[in-house]
Image: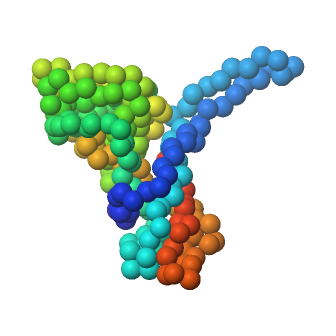
Amino acid sequence: MAIDLPSGGLLNFAAFPLSGTRDNRDADGHSVQRFRRAKSKWGVSVNVAPRSAVDIAPWTDLQDDAEVFALEIPQPDLDIGNPGTPRVKGAGQGGTSLVLDGLTPGYTMRQSQWLSIIISGQRYAYRTRAPSTASGLGEITVSINPAIRVSPADNNVVEIANPKIEGYADLPAQAFDMDSSGMVRGLSFTLKERR
């Protein structure tokens, strides 16, 4: 299971796609076809606000390069509301649409809203491509990016209220350098999904 990193106190959080698309070029190199494969995933670049030696302690787990970490995805300009208890509706789903149930009837997922799905103990982060609204039965079909990488099982948990990205962290060598006042001011790292 992943180690949860502290939420809040971030100076910067920037998501970037890690593309799994491949280009197929003709012999002359003039014509290109792009193929989307179920290999694309997300990475994030994070800068943490300055912290004292005591307050930085929960972040020091990042120095273990073999651990998997989970970080809540901030959505500060979005009122998440009450999504209910979302779950995957039906096994065997693939592509760029995801059918969910258990949502609050009438709940609207906004464009570019994040969600994460827990499959066999691992989280997979997705971003919505278009708005969609749950039916009176609490069912919704969400258009997502990237395409589904691992087909979820029926009733897998979907995190909408507090979605997280999970993966390995990369730190610069000076990530935890402390200045003369006892503050760590330059903690930054990237977190990339495993799969």
Specify the farthest residue to the right: 28
- The answer to which of 183 and 114 lies nearer the viewer is 183
Q: In this view, does 116 lie to the left or right of 82?
A: right
Q: Residue at x 35, y 43 (%)?
A: 76
Residue 106 in view, yes or no: yes
The residue shown at (18%, 37%) is 82
Q: Residue furthest front?
A: 181
Which sits in the foreground, 115 or 76?
76
Answer left or right for 112 relative to 170.
Answer: left
Picture residue at 51% right of the left edge, 73% below the top: 184
Residue 48, given in percent of the width and then of the height, sits at 47, 61
Residue 95 vs 87, above or below: the answer is above
Residue 112 in which image quadrant: top left
Q: In this picture, is 10 found above or below 89?
A: below
Give the x, y percent position of residue 80. 26, 37
Q: Quadrant of the N terminus?
A: bottom left
**Residue 55 in picture, x, y percent from top left:** 38, 74
On screen, residue 34 versus residue 10, left or right, reads right
- Of 152 and 130, which appears nearest the observer? 130
Residue at 56 percent of width and 79 percent of height: 179
